[in-house]
Image (tube, rainbow, N blue to C red):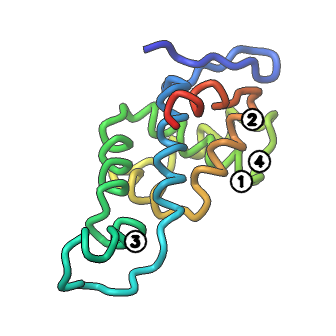
């Protein structure tokens, strides 16, 4: 897959995550963020009887969450680091000029719990999208394909 390259400061910085992958993660994170709290932890009826309301609730074995965590976990370490740095950039913790510093901090903080960390961050999709926007990119062309 093609990697995204961004002009940052005086040099060029290349992300280890293809833009399409980041946009897919954003889409999945939005699906997960839209879940409601569980109202019936173990319903006795089948999904057809309750109009499949359970799929809109945030259950611990949520397939959207499992897919999102699996996707992030399967990315290479550099890609995971870039996702964390993008999220930090997007939540206004840092400016564009600090990209290299942010990425270094994400490198220093990296561990085997990156997927859990990212998926447990409120507004993950918004932060990733804002981080991309700060770098001058958008998921607009990918959103239309996955609707």
Residue drawn at 45 percent across, 39 percent down: 80
Compare marks 1 and 2 and give the one earlier in the sequence: 1
Q: CA distance from mark 3 to mark 1?
A: 24 Å
Q: Quadrant of residue 135?
A: top right
Compare marks 3 and 2 and give the one earlier in the sequence: 3
Compare marks 3 and 4 and give the one earlier in the sequence: 3
Q: Position of residue 43 (x, y in %)?
A: 23, 84
Q: Position of residue 44 (x, y in %)?
A: 18, 85
Q: CA distance from mark 3 to mark 2?
A: 29 Å
Which residue is disc 1 drawn over?
91
Which residue is disc 2 drawn over?
133
**Given this view, does label 4 or label 2 mark the residue nearer the observer?**
2
Which residue is disc 3 drawn over?
58
Determine whether label 1 and label 4 are within 8 Å by CB: no
Q: CA distance from mark 1 to mark 2?
A: 11 Å
Disc 4, SS: loop
Vertical arrangement, residue 69 with respect to residue 9, above or below: below
Vertical arrangement, residue 140 with respect to residue 29, above or below: above
Which residue is disc 4 drawn over?
94
Residue drawn at 50 percent across, 51 percent down: 29
């Amino acid at each position: 897959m093609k990697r995204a390259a961004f002009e940052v400061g005086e040099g060029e910085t290349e992300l280890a995550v293809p833009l399409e992958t980041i946009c897919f993660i954003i889409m999945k994170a939005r699906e997960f963020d839209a879940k409601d709290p569980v109202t019936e932890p173990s319903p006795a009826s089948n999904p057809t009887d309750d109009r499949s309301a359970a799929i809109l609730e945030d259950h611990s074995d949520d397939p959207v969450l499992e897919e999102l965590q699996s996707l992030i976990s399967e990315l290479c370490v550099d890609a995971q680091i870039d996702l964390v740095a993008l999220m930090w950039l997007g939540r206004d913790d840092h400016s564009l000029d600090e990209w290299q510093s942010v990425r270094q901090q994400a490198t220093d903080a990296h561990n085997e719990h990156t997927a859990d960390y990212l998926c447990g961050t409120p507004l993950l999709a918004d932060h990733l999208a804002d981080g991309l926007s700060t770098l001058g990119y958008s998921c607009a062309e990918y959103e239309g394909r996955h609707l």
